[in-house]
Structures are given as C-alpha cells and as structure tokens.
C-alpha cells in the first residue's frame, strides 16, 4: 500500500511542480531594430520584442528624464511583437526596452536598445592620414572632423550592405585607429558627429571612404594559379592535337579518297 501511495503522491506533487516550473519559465525578452539602430531623420524603423508563444501582452518603453515610460502596448498571443516608428525624429530617438506578460506576471526587461536619429546637423568630413590601401596586419587611422560644428563625439561605421557593423565612439579629435586589419576590414566607412549632451541625435553621415585591404601574397598566388591554369590549358591543347592526329591516322586507311592535300 505504501509504495502505491508514494507513486500517487508523486504523480500529483511532481506534476504540480512541473507545471509550476513551466509557469515560472520566463526567458528574458530580446529587443532588436530593423534595418538597424542608426536611422536617418523621418525614416521608419521596426522594433521587435521577442518573448514566448504564450506571451499575450508586450510593452515597449523609452527612457525620458532618466525614468522609463511606456510608449506602446500590443495585446495578442504572439512570440514576438512588432512596434513601428514611422517617422524617426529627436523624440523617438533614445534608449528603449521591452517586456512581456505571460499568465499573470511580467517577464524581466530586455536589454536596452539605443536608437539614433541622424541628419540633424551638417555632415562631417572623413579622411585617412595615409593611403586607403593597406595590408593585413597594418593599422590605419581615420579622422572625422567638422569645419562648422564643435562636435565633442564622433562615431564611425562600416557598411556591409545596409547594416552598420562597426560602431565606435571617438574622442574629441575624432581619430579612429583601425587594426591590425584583416581582409574583412575592406569596405566603405562613414562617420557622424554628435554632442555628448544628446547622444541619440547625430549629424548626417560623412561621404564614404572606401578602405581596401589587400593581401599581396594572395595576389602572388593568384598569379601562380593563372600560370598553372595556362600550362594546364596548353597541355590539354597538345593532347587534343595528338588525339586528333591519332584519329586522323586511323581514319585515312578507310577512306577511298586519296590523302588530303598536304598542309603547307
Ligand atoms: C517624411 O517622410 C514622408 C514619407 O514617409 C514624406 O511624405 C514627407 O514629405 C517627409 N517629410 C519631410 C519633411 O521630408
Ligand atoms: C524632465 O525633467 C525636467 C526637470 O526635472 C523638467 O523640467 C522637464 O519638463 C522634464 N521633461 C520631460 C519630458 O518630462
Ligand atoms: C597596431 O596597433 C596595435 C595596438 O592597437 C599595436 O600593438 C601594433 O604594434 C600596431 N601595428 C603596427 C604595424 O603599427
Ligand atoms: C578580422 O578581425 C576582426 C576584428 O579583429 C575579427 O573579429 C575577425 O574574426 C577577423 N576576420 C578574419 C577573417 O580573420
Ligand atoms: C563602396 O561604395 C562604392 C560606391 O557606392 C561601391 O561601388 C563599392 O562597391 C562599395 N564597396 C564595398 C566594399 O561595399
């Protein structure tokens, strides 16, 4: 009787615990923005908050005056909620976070997402002290500066398609040392100027600079490869010629016609 009781007890108790554990399972939501977190003024951006399929209420908050306030809520069972900002401006730029509700409780907050609006000041100028063609392992210095604006911060970004992959904040002088570089540093770079008092409001992007990282030894091997291919091609031609000759030799005895006139 006793073992049966324990089994029954476990069936009730353990099951209860399992349900409780599931209820208590609240993964931290993740927040992201497409096409990215650096958005030109008046353009749109989509903020995604990822929760769980059982989440039915999502809340997006923005930091204003060092406290967060709710921007928008989405009420519907969905594993991710979409918040759209149609016209990016200085009021919609800032630090965001989100959370979701499941059963009767809220999840924790996501990490912060910092959305930046660009194009509020004239573009700065980006230039390289030395050439824009560098070898892997070398360092390159890019300078960002403005003739008219007294920016106290600069950011540099590299574009791989539409995405901004590199983002660094410079000091007053706006000098960015990249390196030691590798081939993946090749690409177009732009910089922005801003003021530390308004960190989410940036200038228009500078004109792009194209950085080229080339591996000269790779070029050498490319040349070698070309030569090898050439030799292989030549061998093939010779083989074909021999084959043709051979085939010709076999064909001639069967033809009634006399030999084709001599090539000369
Ligand atoms: C802002 O963008 C909308 C289209 O999304 C456009 O119709 C409008 O003219 C733009 N406003 C300004 C001031 O450029
Ligand atoms: C932020 O706080 C300051 C002073 O504490 C106040 O003057 C200002 O109106 C507040 N701004 C907003 C948007 O709440
Ligand atoms: C590149 O910079 C690193 C420090 O970031 C330094 O250790 C290294 O010596 C530099 N390399 C060259 C080739 O100047
Ligand atoms: C190039 O350098 C970056 C940053 O140092 C590194 O994350 C990346 O893995 C490197 N790529 C290659 C192909 O070595
Ligand atoms: C850099 O920009 C130029 C002009 O827009 C483009 O032709 C080139 O393909 C870009 N380079 C890379 C590596 O994306």
Image: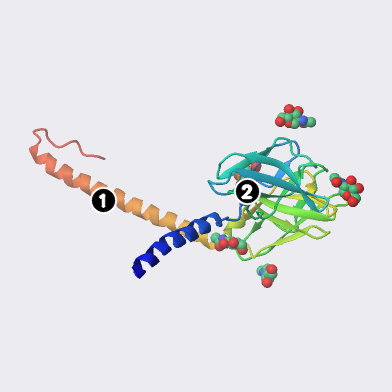
Depth order, front residue of 79/167: 79
Q: CA distance from mark 2 to mark 1?
A: 72 Å
Residue 239: which disc?
Answer: 1
* As drawn, 254 above or below 62: above
User: Residue 89's x, y, as percent?
Assistant: 78, 39
* Mark 2 lies on residue: 100
Q: Quadrant of ligand 5?
A: top right
Disc with the residue nearer the chain's start (2 vs 1): 2
Indicate the quadrant containing the C terminus: top left, top right, bottom left or bottom right.
Answer: top left
User: Residue 220's x, y, as percent?
Assistant: 50, 60
Q: How many numbered marks appear?
A: 2
Residue at 36% x, 55% y is 231
Q: Secondary structure at mark 1?
A: helix
Neighbor class of circle 1 (other Cα within 10 Å; few <14, some 14-19, many 20+) is: few
Depth order, front residue of 240/191: 191
Q: Residue furthest front?
A: 1
Q: Secondary structure at mark 2?
A: strand
Circles 2 and 1, Cβ within 8 Å, touching? The answer is: no
């Amino acid at each position: 009787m006793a073992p049966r009781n324990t089994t029954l007890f476990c069936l009730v108790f353990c099951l209860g615990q399992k349900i409780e554990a599931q209820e208590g399972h609240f993964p931290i939501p993740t927040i992201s923005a497409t096409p990215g977190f650096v958005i030109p003024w008046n353009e749109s951006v989509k903020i995604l908050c990822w929760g769980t399929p059982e989440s039915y209420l999502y809340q997006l908050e923005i930091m204003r005056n060092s406290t967060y306030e709710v921007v928008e809520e989405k009420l519907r069972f969905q594993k991710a909620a979409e918040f759209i900002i149609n016209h990016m401006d200085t009021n919609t730029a800032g630090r965001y976070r989100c959370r979701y509700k499941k059963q009767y409780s809220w999840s924790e907050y996501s990490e912060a997402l910092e959305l930046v609006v660009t194009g509020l000041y004239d573009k700065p100028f980006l230039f390289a002290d030395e050439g824009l063609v560098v070898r892997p392992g070398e360092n390159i210095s890019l300078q960002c500066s403005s003739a008219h604006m007294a920016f106290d911060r600069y950011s540099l970004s590299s574009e791989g398609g539409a995405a901004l992959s590199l983002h660094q904040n410079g000091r007053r002088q706006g000098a960015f040392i990249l390196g030691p570089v590798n081939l993946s540093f090749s690409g177009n770079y732009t910089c922005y100027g801003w003021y530390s008092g308004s960190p989410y409001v940036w200038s228009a992007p500078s004109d792009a600079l194209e950085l080229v990282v080339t591996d000269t030894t790779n070029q050498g091997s490319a040349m070698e490869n070309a030569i090898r291919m050439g030799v292989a091609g030549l061998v093939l031609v010779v083989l074909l010629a021999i084959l043709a000759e051979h085939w010709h030799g076999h064909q001639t005895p069967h033809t009634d016609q006399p030999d084709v006139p001599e090539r000369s």
